[in-house]
Image (cartoon, grey):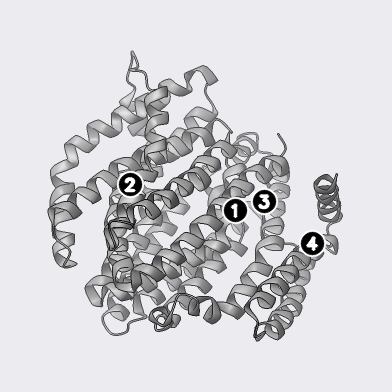
Amino acid sequence: MSLVKKASKTFLWTILGNLIGFGMQLYIAKILGATEYGKANVIFGITGMYVVFFNFGLPWLIVREISVSDTKKSDKILSEYIILYWILDILFFPLIYYITKYSLIKSNMFSSINIFYVIVLFLLMQISDIIFNYYVGKRKQNISSFIKSFLIKIIFMVSFFLIYIFIYDYKALVISQILSLIIPTIILIKKFSFPYKLNFFHIIKNSWQYYLLTVTYSLYTNISKVLQKIYSTNEMVGYLSLGIMLGTLGDILGSVLANIAIPEFASYSKNKDYEKIKILFQKISRYNTYIILPIVIFTLFNLKRLISFLGKDYEKGFLIISIIVISKFFDSFVGPNGTLLNMSGHQKFEIFNGLTMIFVGITTGIILGNKFEWGIAASIALSAIIVNVLKFIEVGIIFKIYPYTKYTLFYILINSFLYSLVFYLTKGLSSILFWIIINGIITIIAIIFFFVFSPIKEDKNFIISYIQKLLS
């Protein structure tokens, strides 16, 4: 299956799921209010820390192991990894329990039911991560995306509406999240078989670098929510979490294309085919920018109006949300640098980058978070921007590859300026329905024009061919 075809299917499920999830999160944030929404995200933040600390690099490693193994061995490899997870979870359970208890006490949310929520969510999220990456390793990213981005969101939505009839606080959100993660567990049960031989030493030997990568890159996002609660209120955690969620809009397509590119970068690097690496790297960078940039520009010019739909409760968090959204969008335009470094044997650079993110994030978070309500948001933004600049420099030095040629970059900047003018003029439309329709049409036209007038002829041919297929 071609890159475009595979990416189209994966992106379809991802965008549908994210639209559902985005709409649901906005609705939930509004009806629960910033305080209750913030409480749920304290639970999610603590759980997220455990998923990061106790993943042991297995989700990343299983992609590599399955992608280079016989297809018949895939279920055996999956079973090995799950058994190792369970053994490690049992060994570390006392530590998990006491850290959970301490974190909840510090957040003024200690109760037996909250400890139960954290531990159950942690176990289900472990299984989910392995199942998602199991399908990526089998080059079935579309199935992984269907389950992760679409099916789970649908179950979450239905569960929340049913539960909210009886429970009106943050617990409705947490329980819905738990129920939505049952599907990966069912898949695991069907595929699990006890292997005759357990290669635990081989797994641990090869997973440590991926473990460091996951810890360093994912840790601060989860710690930030806990720091925000320690330094301020549940309400501020709600603002921070909403900003992080809105920021993922700019990273949807980039994540899809990066997942598609993982096995290809690994293969090209092994064969030292650097020209193919360059072509794929720049194609992913262009396509992601052409599609996401108009959405980003619209969001930035209309962010205050979008937040106002949630009610006055969230308007007070405009600055926090804005800082996070702007920094997250920056991630989308530097190309799949991290994916290329990881899949080409240069994980040490990504480990350094991740450690830099933690150091900058925690240091600035402690300094600014204790003084300003927006301090934690600024620490997230600063750490993300610095690390993306580092990755850009590293890939440039190692591979002599940059996301765009100078002509493409100039083309993108000119179009960004033009579309900024257009969205500036339309942001003041008084009718909400007219505002939605006009901006929706402009966004679609902007994406098509990006491809049609691209300095790369292949881009124009792609969009024309794609539109013809849609209309046929």
Residue 86: percent from left, percent from top: 26, 32
Q: Of the residues under marks 3 and 4, which one precedes in the sequence?
A: 3
Label 3 environment density (alpha carbons within 10 Å; few <14, some 14–19, many ≥20): many
Q: Which residue is mark 4?
A: 448
Q: Nearer the viewer, residue 313 or 301?
A: 313
Q: Residue at x 17, y 52 (%)?
A: 113
Mark 4–mark 1 CB contact (< 8 Å): no
124 with respect to 104 (left or right): right
**Cα separation between marks 4 and 1:** 18 Å
Q: Residue at x 35, y 74 (%)?
A: 376
**Cα separation between marks 2 and 1:** 22 Å
**Cα separation between marks 3 and 2:** 37 Å
Q: Residue at x 16, y 68 (%)?
A: 108
Residue 383: percent from left, percent from top: 43, 69
User: Residue 10 occupies which quadrant of the picture?
Assistant: top right
Residue 249 vs 57, above or below: the answer is: below
Q: Nearer the viewer, mark 4 or mark 2?
A: 2
Residue 178 marker: 2
Q: Of the residues under marks 4 and 2, which one precedes in the sequence?
A: 2
User: Residue 30 occupies which quadrant of the picture?
Assistant: bottom left
Amino acid carrying label 4: it is Ile
Label 2 environment density (alpha carbons within 10 Å; few <14, some 14–19, many ≥20): some
**Cα separation between marks 3 and 1:** 22 Å
